[in-house]
Amino acid sequence: MFVFLIIGAIAGMLLGLRFNVFALVPAILLAIIAIALSDLVNRQSVAMIVLTVFATVVLLQIGYVVGRLLKVAAQAYLPTRTNVPYRGSKSELTRY
């Protein structure tokens, strides 16, 4: 159970750093399937499976919010990249 909680929180942070909120839907579905299969193989009770799924989904969402806050804080304090487009050479020799 605790492994799923830790993985859910870390995965939520990573999703928050890179993706928008719609990435949580497949992550939640994948977590539900993984937890259900794992706990059924280990012969856990249905109540324990439901509790694990609920706690993991909550920690996934909390991790997402923390990851999003970290991204906003990093963008505020770190210098932004300036990509200068290639303009070509202005030399007479390279024109022909």
Image (cartoon, helix red, strand yellow):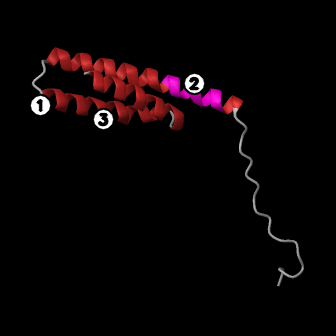
Nearer to us of marks 3 and 2 is 2
User: Mark 2 or mark 3, which is nearer the start of the sequence?
Assistant: 3
Mark 3 sits on what residue?
A: 30
- Where disc 3 sits, the SS reads helix
Residue for point 50% across, 37% down: 19
- Where disc 2 sits, the SS reads helix
Q: CA distance from mark 3 to mark 2?
A: 24 Å
On the rendered image, what quadrant is the C terminus found in? bottom right
Q: Which residues are magenta?
A: 65-74
Is 48 in the magenta? Answer: no
Q: Residue 41 shows which numbered tag? A: 1
The relative height of residue 50 versus residue 30 in the rendered view (above or below) is above
Q: Residue 55 shows which numbered tag? A: none
The relative height of residue 43 versus residue 92 in the rendered view (above or below) is above
Nearer to us of marks 1 and 3 is 1
Report the magenta stretch's main SS: helix
Quarter-wise, where is residue 11 in the image? top left
